[in-house]
Amino acid sequence: MRAQLTGVLSDQQWAKPKPGSWTPPKPAPDGLPPKITRIATQDKVVFLTIDDGYEYDAEFVNLVRKERVPILTFLTSRYVEGQGQYFWALRNAGSQMENHTVSHPNMASLSPEGQRKEICKASDTIAEQYGRRPQIFRPPFGSMNETTRQKAKECGIKSILLWSAEFYNGTTGPGVGFNGFARGDGAGKNFRPGDIILMHYRKGLAEQFQMILGWIRQQGFRPAAVENYLPKSLGGNAPDQPGPAGQTEQPATVP
């Protein structure tokens, strides 16, 4: 694997959306990290996000680099142990490493201190290993409560990114079969602009990734970097939107 990964040397830069083509998510009224499930955009783009990290398919790194496809990794930090080089290669192929806890628990079942440790310690490990502290969090299974948002903020998290559709790559999804695709709203199997798609690091990921890329392109969409559609105040790269008086826009609920 070392030999296959040595060619991945430099960070990728991804195209940014045109002004006026999307509506940036806004901060939540209570000042805690907002929960985001999709991006409001006119562009025919979708966002590929991949969770966990317990399978290490070197061909997948080569594919991401060759195809120049932006992805966002939500890393369970215990999987960094012994596999730091693999995720460095993915980082340099263009994937930010964001927070998916230390040990992948059901967050809503934990005490406040248990939630804080899962989030903060994961961010500590990822920052130490990859040189950047995560600012976006994804709770395992999508399970969370208000305590999750409070502890996430204490750990430096600016937004909580969930998903609007799931590709059950390498596994069987409820009602959709093996390698099935399902929308969270139940509205068919077509992509919609701004969809955030959940995938997982599993055996055969390179082949599965080619499969979903084919579906995306057949429907006239393209993958885009979700961090370029999130304002800096929410952990992304887009500028924050000024209010009428040149001040930061007032908080609003993110659907």
Image (cartoon, rainbow, N blue to C red):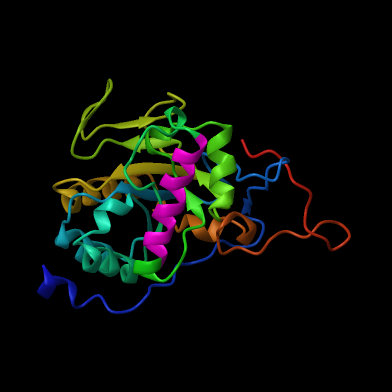
Residue 172 in the image: state x and y as whole percent: 21, 29
In the rendered image, residue 18, in percent from the top left (x then y), is placed at 60, 62
Q: Quadrant of the N terminus?
A: bottom left
Q: Residue 164: x and y, percent?
A: 45, 36
Residue 34 is a magenta residue: no
Q: Nearer the viewer, residue 66 or 71?
A: 71
> Which residue is nearer to you in this view: 158 or 59?
158
Q: Position of residue 109 (x, y in %)?
A: 43, 28
- Residue pictured at 44% horizontal, 39% vertical: 114
69 vs 119, nearest the viewer: 119
- Main SS, magenta region, reads helix
Residue at 43 percent across and 72 percent down: it is: 13
Judge by depth and name the residue closer to the eye, 252 or 80: 80
**Residue 205 versus residue 6 in the image, above or below:** above
Q: Which quarter of the figure is the C terminus placed in?
A: top right
Lateral position of residue 125 relative to residue 108, left or right:
left
* Residue 238 image-quadrant placement: bottom right
Q: Residue at x 47, y 26 (%)?
A: 185
Q: Residue at x 22, y 65 (%)?
A: 86
Is 55 left or right of 254, judged from the image as shown? left
113 within the magenta span: yes
Q: Which residues are magenta?
A: 112-127
Q: Is residue 133 visible?
A: yes
Q: Can the viewer see residue 96 in this picture?
A: no
